[in-house]
Image: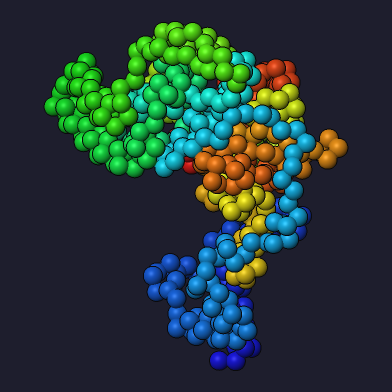
Amino acid sequence: MTCRRIACVLAAAALAAASWCAPLRAADGRTLSCPPSRRPVDFSDSAGRISEEMLAAFRAMVAADPRTAPVTNAVTRNSVKDLTVDLRMVTAHDGAFSHPIKTGSVTDQRASGRCWLFAGFNILRPRILKQYNLADFEFSQNYSFFWDKLEKANLFLEGILRTLDRRLDDRHIAWLLKTPFPDGGQWNMVVDLVARYGLVPRDVMPDTKHSSGTAELNGIVSLLLRKNAARLRALNAEGKSLEELRGAKVAMLADIYRILCYHFGEPPAAFSWRYKSKDDKLSEMKTYTPKSFYREFVGVDLGEYLLFYSCPAHAFGRLYRIEFDRDVSDAKDMTFVNVPMETLKGMVLKQILAEEPVWFGSDVGQEHFRDSGILRPGIHAIGALLGIDLGMTKAERVLYRASNPTHAMVLMGVDLAGDKPVKWRVENSWGAQRGDKGYLMMYDDWFDEYLYAALVHAKHVPEDIKALFDGEPVVLPPWDPMYDGLR
Protein backbone atom coordinates (compact mmCIF):
# COMPACT_ATOMS: atom_id res chain seq x y z
CA MET A 1 0.00 0.00 0.00
CA THR A 2 1.43 3.41 -0.91
CA CYS A 3 1.97 6.20 1.60
CA ARG A 4 -0.73 8.18 -0.22
CA ARG A 5 -3.16 5.27 0.15
CA ILE A 6 -2.30 4.98 3.87
CA ALA A 7 -2.94 8.68 4.34
CA CYS A 8 -6.28 8.40 2.56
CA VAL A 9 -7.41 5.49 4.75
CA LEU A 10 -6.43 7.23 7.95
CA ALA A 11 -7.92 10.55 6.83
CA ALA A 12 -11.20 8.87 5.95
CA ALA A 13 -11.33 7.21 9.35
CA ALA A 14 -10.60 10.52 11.08
CA LEU A 15 -13.24 12.31 9.00
CA ALA A 16 -15.84 9.67 9.84
CA ALA A 17 -15.05 9.96 13.54
CA ALA A 18 -15.15 13.76 13.42
CA SER A 19 -18.47 13.74 11.56
CA TRP A 20 -20.00 11.40 14.14
CA CYS A 21 -18.67 13.28 17.20
CA ALA A 22 -18.77 16.94 16.17
CA PRO A 23 -21.77 18.97 17.41
CA LEU A 24 -23.93 20.82 14.88
CA ARG A 25 -23.69 24.60 15.08
CA ALA A 26 -25.98 27.38 13.79
CA ALA A 27 -24.63 30.37 11.89
CA ASP A 28 -24.55 32.40 15.12
CA GLY A 29 -22.40 29.77 16.84
CA ARG A 30 -25.16 28.13 18.90
CA THR A 31 -24.90 24.37 19.38
CA LEU A 32 -27.89 22.57 17.90
CA SER A 33 -29.29 19.21 18.86
CA CYS A 34 -28.68 16.46 16.38
CA PRO A 35 -31.56 15.89 13.91
CA PRO A 36 -32.87 12.40 13.35
CA SER A 37 -30.41 10.41 11.26
CA ARG A 38 -31.27 10.03 7.58
CA ARG A 39 -30.15 6.44 7.79
CA PRO A 40 -29.99 3.92 10.63
CA VAL A 41 -26.81 4.15 12.70
CA ASP A 42 -25.00 0.82 12.66
CA PHE A 43 -23.81 -0.08 16.18
CA SER A 44 -23.37 -3.75 15.41
CA ASP A 45 -20.15 -5.47 16.46
CA SER A 46 -19.04 -5.87 12.87
CA ALA A 47 -19.39 -2.14 12.13
CA GLY A 48 -16.93 -1.21 14.87
CA ARG A 49 -14.40 -3.96 14.33
CA ILE A 50 -10.74 -3.46 13.44
CA SER A 51 -10.75 -4.22 9.74
CA GLU A 52 -8.04 -5.80 7.63
CA GLU A 53 -7.72 -2.54 5.71
CA MET A 54 -7.03 -0.66 8.96
CA LEU A 55 -4.38 -3.18 9.98
CA ALA A 56 -2.69 -2.95 6.58
CA ALA A 57 -2.59 0.83 6.92
CA PHE A 58 -1.16 0.61 10.44
CA ARG A 59 1.55 -1.84 9.36
CA ALA A 60 2.53 0.34 6.43
CA MET A 61 2.62 3.44 8.64
CA VAL A 62 5.02 1.78 11.09
CA ALA A 63 7.18 0.39 8.28
CA ALA A 64 7.48 3.84 6.67
CA ASP A 65 8.43 5.61 9.90
CA PRO A 66 12.25 6.01 10.18
CA ARG A 67 11.96 6.23 13.98
CA THR A 68 10.45 2.77 14.35
CA ALA A 69 13.71 0.78 14.64
CA PRO A 70 15.64 3.08 17.03
CA VAL A 71 12.64 3.77 19.29
CA THR A 72 11.70 0.08 19.40
CA ASN A 73 15.29 -0.90 20.24
CA ALA A 74 15.40 1.66 23.05
CA VAL A 75 11.94 1.07 24.57
CA THR A 76 12.04 -2.73 24.53
CA ARG A 77 15.16 -2.66 26.71
CA ASN A 78 14.49 0.31 29.00
CA SER A 79 11.91 2.12 31.10
CA VAL A 80 10.17 4.84 29.09
CA LYS A 81 10.54 7.23 32.05
CA ASP A 82 14.29 6.56 32.21
CA LEU A 83 14.63 7.25 28.50
CA THR A 84 12.68 10.50 28.59
CA VAL A 85 14.18 12.43 31.52
CA ASP A 86 14.86 15.99 30.36
CA LEU A 87 18.54 16.44 31.25
CA ARG A 88 18.30 20.19 30.81
CA MET A 89 15.71 20.44 33.58
CA VAL A 90 17.75 18.22 35.88
CA THR A 91 21.01 20.12 35.42
CA ALA A 92 19.27 23.50 35.71
CA HIS A 93 17.64 22.48 38.99
CA ASP A 94 18.74 24.42 42.08
CA GLY A 95 18.08 22.63 45.37
CA ALA A 96 18.24 25.74 47.59
CA PHE A 97 15.18 27.38 49.18
CA SER A 98 14.88 30.99 50.30
CA HIS A 99 12.39 30.18 53.08
CA PRO A 100 12.86 26.67 54.56
CA ILE A 101 11.13 25.43 57.74
CA LYS A 102 13.19 23.37 60.19
CA THR A 103 11.87 19.99 61.25
CA GLY A 104 13.07 16.57 62.42
CA SER A 105 14.27 13.53 60.50
CA VAL A 106 12.33 12.29 57.50
CA THR A 107 9.67 9.70 58.32
CA ASP A 108 8.88 6.49 56.45
CA GLN A 109 5.41 5.00 55.97
CA ARG A 110 7.01 2.01 54.19
CA ALA A 111 4.58 -0.30 52.37
CA SER A 112 1.42 1.21 53.82
CA GLY A 113 -1.10 3.83 52.72
CA ARG A 114 -0.70 6.00 55.83
CA CYS A 115 0.58 9.14 54.07
CA TRP A 116 -2.34 11.24 55.36
CA LEU A 117 -1.50 10.25 58.95
CA PHE A 118 2.24 10.83 58.60
CA ALA A 119 1.63 14.20 56.96
CA GLY A 120 -0.87 15.14 59.66
CA PHE A 121 1.63 14.40 62.42
CA ASN A 122 4.48 16.05 60.52
CA ILE A 123 2.79 19.46 60.58
CA LEU A 124 2.72 19.22 64.39
CA ARG A 125 6.36 18.15 64.90
CA PRO A 126 8.18 21.50 64.39
CA ARG A 127 6.19 23.06 67.24
CA ILE A 128 7.17 20.27 69.67
CA LEU A 129 10.82 20.20 68.56
CA LYS A 130 11.14 23.92 69.18
CA GLN A 131 9.13 24.11 72.41
CA TYR A 132 10.93 21.23 74.13
CA ASN A 133 14.34 21.73 72.49
CA LEU A 134 14.36 18.23 71.02
CA ALA A 135 16.73 16.91 68.38
CA ASP A 136 14.00 14.70 66.96
CA PHE A 137 10.54 13.40 67.77
CA GLU A 138 7.79 11.32 66.17
CA PHE A 139 4.28 10.46 67.21
CA SER A 140 3.30 6.80 67.05
CA GLN A 141 1.64 6.30 63.69
CA ASN A 142 1.02 2.68 64.67
CA TYR A 143 -1.09 3.73 67.69
CA SER A 144 -3.38 6.00 65.68
CA PHE A 145 -3.48 3.59 62.74
CA PHE A 146 -4.77 0.82 65.02
CA TRP A 147 -7.78 2.95 65.93
CA ASP A 148 -8.24 4.09 62.34
CA LYS A 149 -8.44 0.48 61.20
CA LEU A 150 -10.93 -0.50 63.91
CA GLU A 151 -13.07 2.56 63.16
CA LYS A 152 -13.01 1.85 59.42
CA ALA A 153 -14.18 -1.71 60.03
CA ASN A 154 -17.06 -0.36 62.10
CA LEU A 155 -17.84 2.27 59.45
CA PHE A 156 -18.01 -0.44 56.78
CA LEU A 157 -20.37 -2.61 58.84
CA GLU A 158 -22.54 0.42 59.62
CA GLY A 159 -22.63 1.14 55.89
CA ILE A 160 -23.92 -2.39 55.31
CA LEU A 161 -26.60 -1.94 57.99
CA ARG A 162 -27.71 1.36 56.48
CA THR A 163 -28.13 -0.16 53.01
CA LEU A 164 -30.02 -3.32 53.94
CA ASP A 165 -33.01 -2.16 51.90
CA ARG A 166 -30.95 -1.91 48.70
CA ARG A 167 -30.13 -4.50 46.08
CA LEU A 168 -26.67 -6.02 46.28
CA ASP A 169 -25.77 -4.44 42.93
CA ASP A 170 -26.62 -0.94 44.21
CA ARG A 171 -23.70 1.41 43.49
CA HIS A 172 -23.25 2.39 47.16
CA ILE A 173 -22.99 -1.24 48.23
CA ALA A 174 -20.66 -2.04 45.33
CA TRP A 175 -18.45 0.89 46.42
CA LEU A 176 -18.38 -0.37 50.02
CA LEU A 177 -17.52 -3.92 48.99
CA LYS A 178 -14.79 -2.86 46.58
CA THR A 179 -12.45 -1.59 49.33
CA PRO A 180 -13.89 -2.42 52.78
CA PHE A 181 -10.67 -1.88 54.77
CA PRO A 182 -8.58 0.87 53.12
CA ASP A 183 -5.38 2.45 54.43
CA GLY A 184 -5.99 5.86 52.87
CA GLY A 185 -7.51 8.86 54.54
CA GLN A 186 -7.99 12.59 54.81
CA TRP A 187 -7.21 15.39 57.24
CA ASN A 188 -10.62 15.13 58.97
CA MET A 189 -9.69 11.58 59.96
CA VAL A 190 -6.56 12.84 61.73
CA VAL A 191 -8.71 15.33 63.64
CA ASP A 192 -11.31 12.74 64.66
CA LEU A 193 -8.76 10.11 65.72
CA VAL A 194 -6.81 12.58 67.86
CA ALA A 195 -10.00 13.89 69.48
CA ARG A 196 -11.22 10.40 70.38
CA TYR A 197 -8.00 8.54 71.15
CA GLY A 198 -5.26 11.12 71.77
CA LEU A 199 -1.62 10.57 70.77
CA VAL A 200 1.43 8.72 72.06
CA PRO A 201 5.16 8.98 71.22
CA ARG A 202 6.49 6.58 68.62
CA ASP A 203 8.70 4.67 71.07
CA VAL A 204 5.66 3.87 73.26
CA MET A 205 4.02 1.95 70.39
CA PRO A 206 6.51 1.54 67.52
CA ASP A 207 5.70 0.19 64.07
CA THR A 208 5.44 -3.53 63.47
CA LYS A 209 5.93 -5.57 60.31
CA HIS A 210 2.21 -5.32 59.57
CA SER A 211 1.64 -1.64 60.32
CA SER A 212 4.57 -0.94 57.97
CA GLY A 213 3.34 -3.38 55.30
CA THR A 214 -0.43 -3.72 55.31
CA ALA A 215 -1.21 -5.86 52.27
CA GLU A 216 -1.53 -9.19 54.09
CA LEU A 217 -3.61 -7.82 56.97
CA ASN A 218 -5.85 -5.86 54.62
CA GLY A 219 -6.52 -8.96 52.57
CA ILE A 220 -7.48 -11.04 55.62
CA VAL A 221 -9.72 -8.42 57.22
CA SER A 222 -11.31 -7.41 53.90
CA LEU A 223 -12.36 -11.02 53.34
CA LEU A 224 -13.70 -11.23 56.91
CA LEU A 225 -15.65 -7.98 56.48
CA ARG A 226 -17.23 -9.16 53.23
CA LYS A 227 -18.24 -12.38 55.00
CA ASN A 228 -19.68 -10.28 57.84
CA ALA A 229 -21.60 -8.19 55.32
CA ALA A 230 -23.16 -11.33 53.88
CA ARG A 231 -24.02 -12.51 57.39
CA LEU A 232 -25.70 -9.22 58.35
CA ARG A 233 -27.79 -9.21 55.17
CA ALA A 234 -28.77 -12.85 55.77
CA LEU A 235 -29.84 -12.08 59.36
CA ASN A 236 -31.89 -9.17 58.08
CA ALA A 237 -33.58 -11.46 55.55
CA GLU A 238 -34.47 -13.76 58.46
CA GLY A 239 -36.32 -10.88 60.11
CA LYS A 240 -33.82 -10.00 62.84
CA SER A 241 -34.22 -6.57 64.44
CA LEU A 242 -31.69 -3.76 64.06
CA GLU A 243 -30.79 -4.21 67.72
CA GLU A 244 -30.00 -7.87 67.07
CA LEU A 245 -27.98 -6.97 64.00
CA ARG A 246 -25.94 -4.45 65.97
CA GLY A 247 -25.33 -7.12 68.61
CA ALA A 248 -23.91 -9.34 65.87
CA LYS A 249 -21.80 -6.40 64.67
CA VAL A 250 -20.22 -6.02 68.13
CA ALA A 251 -19.08 -9.67 68.01
CA MET A 252 -17.63 -9.07 64.55
CA LEU A 253 -15.70 -6.01 65.76
CA ALA A 254 -14.36 -8.01 68.72
CA ASP A 255 -12.73 -10.40 66.24
CA ILE A 256 -11.20 -7.51 64.33
CA TYR A 257 -9.89 -5.86 67.53
CA ARG A 258 -8.18 -9.13 68.43
CA ILE A 259 -6.70 -9.48 64.94
CA LEU A 260 -5.39 -5.91 65.07
CA CYS A 261 -3.75 -6.63 68.43
CA TYR A 262 -2.00 -9.64 66.89
CA HIS A 263 -0.67 -7.50 64.02
CA PHE A 264 -0.05 -4.07 65.59
CA GLY A 265 0.12 -4.78 69.33
CA GLU A 266 -2.52 -3.49 71.76
CA PRO A 267 -2.66 0.30 72.23
CA PRO A 268 -1.80 1.51 75.75
CA ALA A 269 -4.48 3.03 77.95
CA ALA A 270 -1.70 4.75 79.94
CA PHE A 271 2.10 4.91 79.71
CA SER A 272 5.18 6.32 81.41
CA TRP A 273 7.52 8.46 79.34
CA ARG A 274 10.32 11.01 79.50
CA TYR A 275 12.46 12.81 76.95
CA LYS A 276 16.00 14.13 76.56
CA SER A 277 16.59 17.63 75.16
CA LYS A 278 19.33 18.59 72.71
CA ASP A 279 21.50 19.76 75.64
CA ASP A 280 21.13 16.31 77.27
CA LYS A 281 18.69 17.38 79.99
CA LEU A 282 16.44 14.49 80.97
CA SER A 283 12.84 15.27 81.85
CA GLU A 284 11.00 13.77 84.80
CA MET A 285 9.36 10.40 84.19
CA LYS A 286 5.62 10.95 84.11
CA THR A 287 2.56 8.83 83.48
CA TYR A 288 0.16 9.93 80.76
CA THR A 289 -2.97 8.81 79.07
CA PRO A 290 -2.96 9.32 75.29
CA LYS A 291 -5.36 12.25 75.71
CA SER A 292 -3.38 13.92 78.50
CA PHE A 293 -0.20 13.55 76.45
CA TYR A 294 -1.86 15.29 73.52
CA ARG A 295 -3.15 18.12 75.70
CA GLU A 296 0.26 18.71 77.32
CA PHE A 297 2.59 18.30 74.36
CA VAL A 298 0.47 19.51 71.44
CA GLY A 299 -2.43 21.50 72.81
CA VAL A 300 -3.40 22.74 69.36
CA ASP A 301 -7.05 22.93 68.34
CA LEU A 302 -6.94 20.95 65.10
CA GLY A 303 -10.43 22.22 64.30
CA GLU A 304 -8.92 25.64 63.55
CA TYR A 305 -7.41 24.26 60.34
CA LEU A 306 -9.61 24.56 57.24
CA LEU A 307 -9.39 22.30 54.20
CA PHE A 308 -9.38 23.85 50.74
CA TYR A 309 -9.38 22.26 47.31
CA SER A 310 -8.65 23.70 43.91
CA CYS A 311 -10.39 21.29 41.58
CA PRO A 312 -11.69 22.80 38.32
CA ALA A 313 -14.01 19.82 37.82
CA HIS A 314 -16.25 21.37 40.50
CA ALA A 315 -17.53 24.94 40.77
CA PHE A 316 -15.33 27.35 42.73
CA GLY A 317 -16.56 29.37 45.69
CA ARG A 318 -18.67 26.51 47.08
CA LEU A 319 -18.61 24.29 50.15
CA TYR A 320 -18.59 20.54 49.43
CA ARG A 321 -19.09 17.44 51.52
CA ILE A 322 -18.07 14.00 50.31
CA GLU A 323 -20.43 11.29 51.50
CA PHE A 324 -18.83 8.57 53.68
CA ASP A 325 -15.45 10.37 53.65
CA ARG A 326 -14.59 9.66 57.28
CA ASP A 327 -13.33 6.81 59.41
CA VAL A 328 -15.29 7.37 62.65
CA SER A 329 -18.93 6.39 62.07
CA ASP A 330 -20.48 9.18 64.17
CA ALA A 331 -18.12 11.92 62.95
CA LYS A 332 -18.79 14.36 60.12
CA ASP A 333 -17.84 13.66 56.54
CA MET A 334 -14.91 15.55 55.07
CA THR A 335 -15.90 19.04 53.92
CA PHE A 336 -13.89 21.51 51.88
CA VAL A 337 -14.23 24.83 50.11
CA ASN A 338 -13.22 24.77 46.45
CA VAL A 339 -11.30 27.90 45.40
CA PRO A 340 -9.32 29.02 42.34
CA MET A 341 -5.65 28.06 42.40
CA GLU A 342 -4.39 31.62 42.87
CA THR A 343 -6.56 31.94 46.01
CA LEU A 344 -5.34 28.65 47.43
CA LYS A 345 -1.71 29.42 46.66
CA GLY A 346 -1.93 32.85 48.28
CA MET A 347 -3.15 31.36 51.58
CA VAL A 348 -0.57 28.57 51.48
CA LEU A 349 2.27 31.02 50.83
CA LYS A 350 1.15 33.20 53.74
CA GLN A 351 1.27 30.19 56.08
CA ILE A 352 4.68 29.03 54.86
CA LEU A 353 6.16 32.52 55.29
CA ALA A 354 4.86 32.41 58.88
CA GLU A 355 7.06 29.27 59.25
CA GLU A 356 4.06 26.99 59.63
CA PRO A 357 3.99 23.71 57.62
CA VAL A 358 1.13 22.94 55.23
CA TRP A 359 -0.54 19.54 54.85
CA PHE A 360 -1.54 18.96 51.21
CA GLY A 361 -2.84 16.32 48.81
CA SER A 362 -1.58 15.86 45.26
CA ASP A 363 -1.11 13.36 42.44
CA VAL A 364 2.51 12.56 43.25
CA GLY A 365 2.96 10.01 40.46
CA GLN A 366 2.56 12.60 37.72
CA GLU A 367 5.68 14.10 36.06
CA HIS A 368 7.92 13.09 38.95
CA PHE A 369 11.62 12.32 38.47
CA ARG A 370 12.01 10.01 41.46
CA ASP A 371 15.81 9.73 41.36
CA SER A 372 16.22 13.37 42.37
CA GLY A 373 12.77 14.14 43.76
CA ILE A 374 11.92 16.77 41.13
CA LEU A 375 8.23 17.42 40.47
CA ARG A 376 8.05 19.45 37.25
CA PRO A 377 5.83 19.36 34.15
CA GLY A 378 7.81 18.13 31.17
CA ILE A 379 10.46 16.35 33.24
CA HIS A 380 9.60 13.20 31.25
CA ALA A 381 9.19 13.85 27.49
CA ILE A 382 7.13 10.69 26.91
CA GLY A 383 4.94 12.18 24.20
CA ALA A 384 7.97 13.28 22.17
CA LEU A 385 9.52 9.79 22.33
CA LEU A 386 6.35 7.90 21.42
CA GLY A 387 4.95 10.44 18.97
CA ILE A 388 1.73 11.12 20.89
CA ASP A 389 0.08 14.08 22.59
CA LEU A 390 -0.74 13.37 26.24
CA GLY A 391 -1.87 16.89 27.07
CA MET A 392 -5.16 17.34 28.96
CA THR A 393 -6.54 20.17 31.03
CA LYS A 394 -6.62 19.70 34.80
CA ALA A 395 -10.43 19.45 34.71
CA GLU A 396 -10.28 16.79 31.96
CA ARG A 397 -7.74 14.75 33.92
CA VAL A 398 -10.07 14.71 36.94
CA LEU A 399 -13.31 14.04 35.06
CA TYR A 400 -11.79 11.23 33.00
CA ARG A 401 -10.00 9.62 35.97
CA ALA A 402 -6.52 10.40 34.70
CA SER A 403 -5.54 12.26 37.89
CA ASN A 404 -6.72 12.73 41.44
CA PRO A 405 -5.16 13.32 44.86
CA THR A 406 -3.33 10.09 45.62
CA HIS A 407 -0.79 11.13 48.28
CA ALA A 408 -0.56 13.53 51.23
CA MET A 409 2.69 15.32 52.12
CA VAL A 410 3.81 18.52 53.84
CA LEU A 411 5.09 21.79 52.40
CA MET A 412 8.17 22.77 54.42
CA GLY A 413 9.43 25.80 52.58
CA VAL A 414 9.36 27.90 49.44
CA ASP A 415 11.90 29.46 47.09
CA LEU A 416 10.84 32.96 46.03
CA ALA A 417 11.97 35.16 43.17
CA GLY A 418 10.79 38.53 44.41
CA ASP A 419 7.37 37.69 45.83
CA LYS A 420 6.63 34.85 43.38
CA PRO A 421 7.15 31.16 44.19
CA VAL A 422 9.61 29.31 41.95
CA LYS A 423 9.48 25.98 43.77
CA TRP A 424 8.29 24.45 47.03
CA ARG A 425 10.11 22.20 49.51
CA VAL A 426 8.13 19.04 50.24
CA GLU A 427 8.60 16.73 53.23
CA ASN A 428 7.62 13.26 52.13
CA SER A 429 7.16 10.08 54.19
CA TRP A 430 9.06 7.60 52.01
CA GLY A 431 12.29 7.56 54.02
CA ALA A 432 15.56 9.42 53.52
CA GLN A 433 16.63 7.22 50.58
CA ARG A 434 14.00 8.71 48.23
CA GLY A 435 14.32 12.09 46.52
CA ASP A 436 16.74 14.61 48.01
CA LYS A 437 17.37 12.92 51.40
CA GLY A 438 13.63 12.36 51.72
CA TYR A 439 12.49 15.72 50.37
CA LEU A 440 10.87 16.50 47.03
CA MET A 441 11.21 19.74 45.07
CA MET A 442 7.91 20.86 43.60
CA TYR A 443 8.08 23.51 40.88
CA ASP A 444 5.33 26.09 40.93
CA ASP A 445 3.79 25.01 37.62
CA TRP A 446 3.53 21.43 39.01
CA PHE A 447 1.75 22.93 42.04
CA ASP A 448 -0.81 24.43 39.64
CA GLU A 449 -1.41 21.23 37.71
CA TYR A 450 -1.29 18.42 40.27
CA LEU A 451 -1.88 19.84 43.75
CA TYR A 452 -5.55 19.54 44.72
CA ALA A 453 -5.91 20.11 48.46
CA ALA A 454 -4.21 22.12 51.19
CA LEU A 455 -4.82 22.73 54.88
CA VAL A 456 -4.74 26.35 56.05
CA HIS A 457 -5.06 27.68 59.58
CA ALA A 458 -8.09 29.95 59.98
CA LYS A 459 -5.89 32.95 60.87
CA HIS A 460 -4.47 32.94 57.33
CA VAL A 461 -7.89 32.77 55.62
CA PRO A 462 -9.71 35.95 54.45
CA GLU A 463 -13.05 36.45 56.22
CA ASP A 464 -15.15 36.23 53.04
CA ILE A 465 -13.63 32.85 52.18
CA LYS A 466 -13.89 31.61 55.76
CA ALA A 467 -17.62 32.46 55.70
CA LEU A 468 -18.14 29.86 52.94
CA PHE A 469 -17.74 27.12 55.56
CA ASP A 470 -21.01 28.30 57.15
CA GLY A 471 -23.01 27.55 53.99
CA GLU A 472 -24.98 24.47 52.99
CA PRO A 473 -22.58 22.00 51.35
CA VAL A 474 -22.99 20.40 47.96
CA VAL A 475 -22.94 16.67 48.68
CA LEU A 476 -20.68 14.59 46.44
CA PRO A 477 -20.91 10.78 46.17
CA PRO A 478 -18.19 8.64 47.77
CA TRP A 479 -16.86 7.64 44.35
CA ASP A 480 -15.99 11.25 43.49
CA PRO A 481 -12.34 11.37 42.33
CA MET A 482 -11.45 13.78 45.15
CA TYR A 483 -11.98 10.92 47.63
CA ASP A 484 -11.76 7.72 45.63
CA GLY A 485 -8.09 8.28 44.79
CA LEU A 486 -7.05 8.13 48.45
CA ARG A 487 -8.77 4.82 49.26
Q: Could you tell me which residue is drawn at 37 percent across and 40 percent down?
A: 213
x, y percent for residue 268: 34, 16
Residue furthest to the bottom in view is 2
The residue positioned 70% from the left and 39% from the top of the image is: 424
Vertical placement of 161 versus 363: above or below?
above
Q: Nearer the viewer, residue 38 or 231?
A: 231
- Measuring 71% from the left and 28% from the top, which residue is drawn there? 352
Residue 413 percent coordinates (x, y): 70, 34
405 relative position to 467: left or right: left
Image location (x, y in percent) of residue 313: 60, 41
Quadrant of the image containing the N terminus: bottom right
The residue sitting at the front extreme is 280
Indicate the quadrant containing the C terminus: top left, top right, bottom left or bottom right: top left
Q: Is residue 391 left or right of residue 320?
A: right
Q: Is residue 452 above or below residue 46?
A: above
Q: Residue at x 47, y 68 (%)?
A: 40
Q: Position of residue 324 (x, y in %)?
A: 43, 29
Quarter of the figure with residue 152: top left
In front: 40, or 71? 71
The quarter holding residue 290 reads top left
- Residue 449 shows in this picture: no
Q: Nearer the viewer, residue 177 or 2?
A: 177
* Residue 23 visible, this orientation: yes
Left or right of 447? Residue 98 is: right
